[in-house]
Image (cartoon, helix red, strand yellow):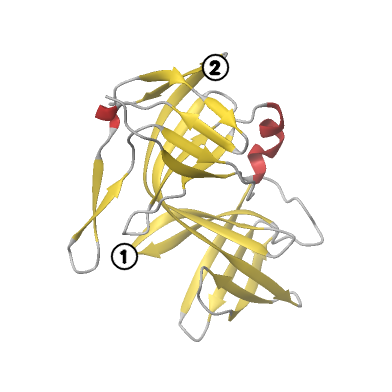
Amino acid sequence: MYRPPISLALILFPAALILAQKDPLVGRWRSSEVSPAGVSSVFEFHGDNQLETSSAVVSEGKYRLVGTDTILLQLDKSREEKQELEWDSQDRARIEDEAAGKSMELARIGKISDSRNPLTSEWSIRREWNGGKYPARVSFFPDGRVLCVVTLRAEHGRYSTQNSSIRLEIAGRPQVEGIFAFTGNRLTLPNRSDYHHHQQLCDRTGHPARVSAFGQDFVLSCGVCF
């Protein structure tokens, strides 16, 4: 049974930029439609035909450095907050909010890209969401943008393409095969109606927050954020 497409948006992380120039499918893609719980569906295509899908919370914002040990950080629509930036080594740092008594430990993913601005990179962190802590990635850009993706649930699989056809194989799920196409800044992926499921997440009150992780055909809009 045909189901109308849903709109998705692309996030492209630094490690994928070079490969993406050769293969526009490579990168991390997320749904532009967000669930009531604030969760997006994310697909990440690797150049080695590996595929990761997840339910994730995506936050965007801005940052400014003041000297070498102070950062002014603003995520989503929150106000800009002054926090301390401390370095344990070239690849490990910590952002501390002394007023709130909280800190965020950063471990660099990959190699340093700019020795003059070592914060400009992709980092592995842990973030709180609905009372729990989850693995996340945060990237700081030279132009002052920051983007954080908190992964709530992840699945691994493989994909293969031939001409305009793509096959998606996720462990424990029906194989999906069909046409994929780029139209301007959008990508459409096939899916099956029985691929649609809802993951149950709970908020602090214990009430389930319904999250649509898959379903229908996927239409992805492309915008290089990383």
- Amino acid type at circle 1 is Asn
The residue shown at (50%, 76%) is 78
Taking 116 as reference, is 122 above or below it? above
Q: Residue 40: image x %, image y %?
A: 40, 50
Which residue is disc 1 drawn over? Answer: 130
Q: Secondary structure at mark 2?
A: loop
Q: Earlier in the sequence, mark 2 or mark 1?
A: 1
Q: Secondary structure at mark 1?
A: loop
The residue shown at (44%, 62%) is 127
Q: CA distance from mark 2 to mark 1?
A: 40 Å
Taking 125 as reference, is 16 above or below it? above
Q: Residue 171: image x %, image y %?
A: 33, 26
Which residue is disc 2 drawn over? Answer: 164
Picture quarter with the N terminus = top left
Is residue 76 found left or right of 174 in the rendered image? right
Seen from the viewer's position, the closer of residues 100 and 105 is 100
Is residue 17 found left or right of 212 in the rendered image? right
The residue shown at (64%, 38%) is 16
Taking 86 as reference, is 197 above or below it? above
Taking 213 as reference, is 106 above or below it? below
